[in-house]
Image (cartoon, rainbow, N blue to C red):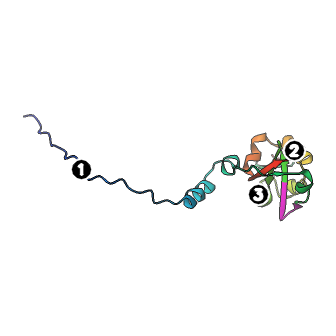
Amino acid sequence: MLPTCKTIPLETNYIPQEDTKSNLEINQSAANSSITSEEKVNSTKSYPLSEIEEHLDVNDCWVGYGGKVYDATDYLSKHPGGKSAITKYCGTVDEFTEALDAKHSPSYINKLPLIGTIE
Ligand code: HEM
């Protein structure tokens, strides 16, 4: 005997579900995901070298690389090679670039939050 086919009724009163996530929630989940800093921050701010050089402290550490400025402060204590490997280059562009290139592949820079470009 052939199986009987059931008729599925058409939904005539379908109301689309509203997106309940706010923009803030979406941004927060992006910040917690593994996407790179470059994707996270669309920063168009540009800083003169003199301003980068002011952020040379362990609690306020900026570095320049590839024409861009990164805030390394929060990464210092997470660095597997130790804090001091990076702290000595806080507030620098050329020195940091040389040190990073000597030790790591350029893509490592994307672990740091991008804050702008070098003027
Ligand atoms: C953007 C900045 C940096 C990031 C994100 C970073 C990231 C890392 C990571 C993930 C490791 C673990 C091992 C590996 O993956 O190779 C590591 C190890 C290490 N890093 Fe860095 N690093 C940075 C800058 C530097 C700088 C400027 C130096 C200075 C020379 C340095 C020196 C080291 C050393 C000595 C190790 C220990 C392991 C080894 O000798 O390879 N790092 N770093």
- Circle 3 sits on which residue? 75
Mark 3 close to ligand 1, CB under 8 Å: yes
Q: Nearer the viewer, mark 2 or mark 1?
A: 1
- Tell me the quarter of the picture where residue 27 sits: bottom right
Amino acid at pointer 3: Tyr
Who's the residue at 57% across and 57% down the image?
29
- Between residue 83 and residue 23, name the one nearer to us: 23
Amino acid at pointer 1: Thr
Q: Is residue 45 above or below residue 107?
A: below
Give the class, few, some or many, for how many residues have Cα within 10 Å of label 2's Cα (few <14, many ≥20).
some
- Residue 88: image x %, image y %? 91, 56
In the image, which residues are magenta? 56-62
- Residue 93: image x %, image y %? 89, 48
- Distance from disc 2 to disc 1, alpha carbons, whole Å, reads 63 Å
Which mark, by number, is residue 12?
A: 1
Give the class, few, some or many, for how many residues have Cα within 10 Å of label 3's Cα (few <14, many ≥20).
some
- Horizontal side of 73 relative to 98 (left or right) equals left
Q: Earlier in the sequence, mark 3 or mark 1?
A: 1
As helix, strand or loop, the secondary structure at mark 2 comes to helix
- Tell me the quarter of the picture where residue 5 sits: top left
Give the class, few, some or many, for how many residues have Cα within 10 Å of label 1's Cα (few <14, many ≥20).
few
